[in-house]
Image (tube, rainbow, N blue to C red):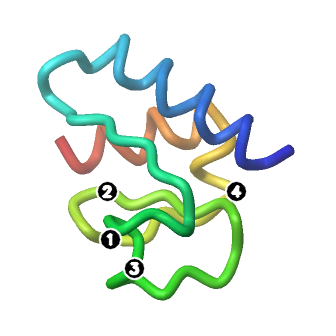
Amino acid sequence: MSCRKAIGVAEDMKKKYGDRIELKIYTTDSKEAEPYHFRSSTNVLFEKEFVPVDVATNRDRMDAFLSLKL
């Protein structure tokens, strides 16, 4: 469930921030994910930095996180 929720939050942030962020969604077994050695199904990165799942799955927390980073 957290994976679907994180995708929804990410898509909402893309709508809000537009060209200021680039959104790419990969499965954990994708070639792009290999270098990260993910251990769970839900992993969110911002500029190669891990975003905690409790932030990535909450619209308000993710918005606050991005507001500080952008």
Q: Which mark is residue 54?
A: 4
Q: Which residue is mark 2?
A: 46
Q: Nearer the viewer, residue 21 or 37?
A: 37
**Residue 23 in which image quadrant:** top left
Q: Amino acid at mark 1?
A: Glu
Q: Is residue 44 left or right of residue 19?
A: right
Q: Is residue 8 left or right of residue 37?
A: right
The answer for how far apart the CA atoms under marks 4 and 3 are is 23 Å
Q: Secondary structure at mark 1?
A: strand
Q: Which residue is mark 1?
A: 49
Between circles 3 and 1, the one closer to the viewer is 3
The answer for how far apart the CA atoms under marks 3 and 1 are is 15 Å
The answer for how far apart the CA atoms under marks 2 and 4 are is 14 Å
- Answer few, some or many: residues within 10 Å of disc 3's Cα (few below 14, many 20 plus, some between 14 and 19): few
**Residue 38 in which image quadrant:** bottom right
Q: Which mark is residue 34?
A: 3
Q: Secondary structure at mark 4?
A: helix
- Seen in the picture, residue 16 relative to 66 is either above or below; the reply is above
Mark 3 touches mark 1? (CB < 8 Å):
no
Between circles 3 and 2, the one closer to the viewer is 3
